Image (cartoon, rainbow, N blue to C red):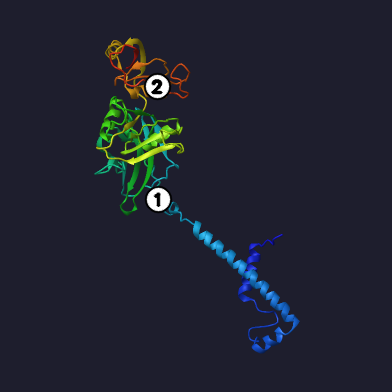
């Protein structure tokens, strides 16, 4: 069995490596003649064996120590966060995130720990791809505040107490999703915290009635807006993928990149690659053409069905007779996602497509095993085969 050494044992041998001298000699008494005499005796043969053993132990100890030092120097990472601890602001919780839906009201927390004599607090919406000036929402000196931009029109300072610089936003919109920075401006001691606002919603793929891959970036952005949505972010697409979105057509995202989510790899969708988000990276926003991934959230109204059969024109009239309009694709997805809307009847929507929402999959309603909004594409508008999905 290998001998086990304690730290004290290592220390003992390290010291012996540095200071070892035969017990019956001192440095002053050792000379060439003495060494020759000693090496001719059996006693000194034992001493040589002892020296050799000690040297071997010393070499082993030194190698171990060197290895430890090397390992420690390789894994040591300075704790910059600890070195840069906030002095005036209270650090938010790890992964600070506030979640709400479109139309809701929220508070983004920012609390002062210490109040400097002269300071300002500036709230900014962080937009990495924004050009020009930063998107300032609000500024305050602790007594009064000033609002900026379109977002500022729905903003206010909470002021629950004298140390409170929290931002309130009302009537949330889809574009409000993202990161916000609360920055204390105090000369050379500026510091900030970042809070994420996540709008809860649903991502849906959208294709032109003229076929696959017909949208430039700006066309895709406009198409989403027409269907009560905006272009999705990568984070929103990723979340949708984790929730079951599997789509084999590539689409534009908000940042100008092109992706598509795959849960079940097949030959026509990435071959043998593992499930994940396939990426084409950034594309030319004018020359390149793809589909779109749109994002929407809850709506103020509701979707309902009127039985047909109708042509497209008749479906619109039927909805108007109920004080409503044909539903948008985004409104259909919102009803399916948030209200679990389920109907096994194809119906016209405002863009000329025919779809139906399934929350409880069954064999005679599309035949697919997963919930979703099924689509018949864009049939001829004079066909009198479908009902109408209305929104009011």
Q: Nearer the viewer, residue 342 or 324?
A: 342
- Looking at the figure, which quarter contains the N terminus? bottom right
Distance from disc 1 to disc 2, alpha carbons, whole Å, reads 54 Å
Q: Residues within 10 Å of mark 2 (few under 14, many from 20)?
A: some
Circles 1 and 2: CB atoms closer than 8 Å: no
Label 1: which secondary element: loop
Quadrant of image for the C terminus? top left
| Most foreground residue, 112 or 62 | 62
Q: Residues within 10 Å of mark 1 (few under 14, many from 20)?
A: some
**Residue 344 - label:** none
To which quarter of the image does residue 141 belong?
top left
Point out the tag, 1 or 2, that comes first from the N-terminus: 1
> Which element is circle 2 on?
strand
Tell me the quarter of the picture where residue 284 sits.
top left
For residue 159, say whether it is visible.
no
Residue 62: name its quadrant: bottom right
Residue under the point 63% across and 66% down? 10
| Residue named by callout 2 | 374
Determine whether, in the image, residue 175 is placed left or right of residue 44. Answer: left
**Numbered mark located on residue 87 in the image:** 1
x%, y% of residue 93? 45, 42
Front residue of 60/144: it is 60
């Amino acid at each position: 069995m290998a001998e086990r050494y304690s730290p004290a044992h290592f220390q003992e041998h390290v010291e012996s490596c540095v200071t070892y001298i035969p017990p019956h000699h001192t440095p002053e008494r050792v000379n060439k003649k003495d060494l020759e005499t000693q090496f001719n005796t059996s006693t000194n043969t034992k001493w040589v064996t002892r020296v050799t053993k000690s040297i071997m132990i010393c070499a082993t100890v030194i190698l171990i120590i060197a290895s430890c030092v090397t390992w420690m120097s390789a894994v040591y990472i300075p704790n910059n966060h600890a070195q840069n601890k906030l002095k005036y602001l209270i650090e938010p919780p790890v992964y600070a995130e506030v979640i709400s839906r479109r139309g809701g009201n929220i508070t983004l927390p920012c609390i002062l720990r210490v109040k400097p004599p002269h300071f300002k607090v500036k709230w900014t919406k962080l937009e990495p791809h924004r050009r020009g000036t930063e998107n300032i929402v609000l500024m305050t000196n602790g007594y009064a505040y000033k609002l900026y931009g379109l977002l500022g029109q729905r903003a206010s300072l909470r002021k629950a107490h004298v140390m409170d610089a929290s931002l309130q936003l009302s009537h949330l919109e889809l574009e409000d999703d993202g990161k916000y920075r609360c920055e204390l401006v105090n000369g050379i001691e500026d510091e900030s915290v970042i809070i994420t606002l996540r709008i809860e919603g649903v991502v849906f793929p959208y294709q032109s009635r003229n076929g696959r891959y017909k949208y430039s970036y700006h066309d895709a952005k406009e198409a989403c807006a027409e269907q009560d949505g905006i272009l999705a972010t990568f984070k929103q697409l990723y979340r949708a993928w984790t929730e079951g979105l599997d789509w084999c057509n590539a689409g534009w995202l908000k940042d100008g990149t092109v992706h598509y989510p795959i849960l079940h790899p097949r030959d026509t969708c990435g071959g043998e690659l593992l499930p994940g988000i396939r990426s084409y990276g950034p594309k030319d926003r004018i020359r390149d053409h793809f589909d779109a991934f749109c994002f929407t959230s809850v709506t103020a109204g509701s979707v309902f069905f009127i039985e047909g059969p109708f042509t497209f024109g008749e479906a619109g009239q039927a909805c108007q007779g109920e004080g409503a309009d044909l539903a948008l694709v985004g409104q259909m997805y919102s009803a399916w996602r948030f209200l679990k809307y389920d109907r096994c009847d194809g119906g016209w929507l405002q863009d000329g497509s025919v779809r139906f929402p399934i929350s409880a999959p069954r064999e005679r309603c599309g035949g697919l095993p997963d919930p979703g909004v099924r689509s018949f594409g864009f049939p001829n508008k004079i066909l009198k085969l479908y009902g109408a999905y209305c929104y009011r």
